[in-house]
Amino acid sequence: MADPRLEQYARLLVETCVDVQPGWQVIVGGGYLARPLIDEISRQVAKRGAYALVRTGSFPASREWLKHAPMELVEKAAPLELHQLEQCDALIVVEAPENTRDMVSIPQERLLAGQAAIRPALERVFRHEVPWVGCQFPTPALAQDAGMGTEEFEDFLYGACLLDWDAERERMQRHADRFDAAEEVRIVGAGTDIRLTLAGRSMKVDAGGANIPGGEFFGCPIEDSAEGVIEFSEFPAVYAGRELRRIRLRFEAGRVVDASADTEEAFLHETLDADDGARRLGELGIGCNPGITRYMKNTLFDEKIDGTVHLALGNGLPDLGGTNVSSIHWDIVKDLREGGRIELDGEVVQENGAWKI
């Protein structure tokens, strides 16, 4: 018997997150292990009178192709690929890795080149001119990274995703409004004292939007405003299949001027040197999902842990006023639940992960 949560999950993606309309062309991409969810998404898209254009496998480009194609092809995305992304009406992507470290086998220069090549076609996505959502399907690899059995992880995933998002939106909006009214944000914690501003820009509440699970509010810092240091000492940062421990970043005038890590430091520097925008912040996010309380080596979930913040290096969010342009967007999570605080214009609004407002 099919798990009834699968249909609920698919309906959340199709109806709430994307709101598929009749006649739309909806790209549905995902790994092979996600077939049960992809099939259910396709059914829900069909019921709305729209087209489901299924792309099963690696999306948008396969690992083996990135590894072996001539660099001149990697640096220039296939015209058909670009056309689909530029013309689709909506995009639903289901991450379902068989091995969460597969990308490690791709040289960094190839990975960055591939990301840069596809970026122009994703401009509509970054600007939220086309509805989209990214999510995950509970695979053994994700469960293993989280230190769970597959069924346990499945329960955890659905518990974090199938919430009353209307109620969550109302709760988070109260906090987001306070950030909107502030001039300066200060984050203090272990090895951390950093100031930035979002003045003139608004925070956006994610409660069943472009990421599932939702459970955060986020905005784009003024590009030259970040000053100070931040140390991501609580959790390893996982990016492109790499695991970096104790990343330390120092900002001056919004730019990373000094960076180190206890592991994969060379990879960190290569990523920061990817392009002119990689050393600036594209996002500040505040985790608020009550169903996510533990670290899982899974950024889609970890950045929503209630009582954490995350900073994203690289590309900004144009629909929120962000102007930073980069081929990367790397969310790194800082835990504030033990000895951390957030100040807005000098007022402590969150301490040890608990809200004071």
Image (tube, grey):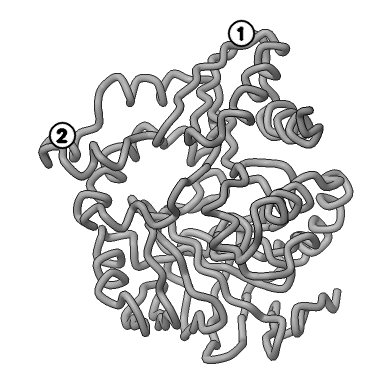
Quadrant including the N terminus = top right
Is residue 16 visible in the rendered image? The answer is no
Q: Quadrant of residue 280?
A: bottom left
Question: Residue 94: horizontal and vertical position, in percent?
Answer: 55, 37
Could you tell me residue 304's position as x and y percent?
67, 61
Residue drawn at the location 70% of the way across and 49% of the way down: 154
Dot 1 amino acid type:
Gly
Vertical comparison of 93 with 28: above or below: below
Hey, which quadrant is residue 268 in on the image? bottom left
Q: Decide which of 238, 203 is in the foreground and name it.
A: 238
Q: Earlier in the sequence, mark 1 or mark 2?
A: 1
The picture places residue 287, in percent across and down from the top left corner, at: 69, 64
- Rendered residue at 39%/57% (across/down): 101
The C terminus, quarter of image? bottom right
Residue at 37% x, 34% y: name it: 60
The answer to whether 246 appears left or right of 35 in the picture is left
Asked which secondary structure carries label 1, the reply is: loop
Indicate whether 211 appears above or below 24. below
Q: In front of the other: label 1 or label 2?
A: 2
> Would you say 72 lies left or right of 279 here?
left
Q: Is residue 17 visible?
A: yes
Q: Is residue 331 above or below residue 18?
A: below
Provide the residue designation for mark 2: 73
Image position, residue 135 (x, y; %): 60, 42
In the foreground, 254 or 143: 143
Q: Amino acid at mark 2?
A: Leu
Residues 317 and 300: in front is 300
Q: Which residue is mark 1?
A: 23
Horizontal side, residue 73 vs residue 249: left or right: left
* Alpha carbon separation for disc pair 1 and 2: 33 Å
* SS class, disc 2: helix
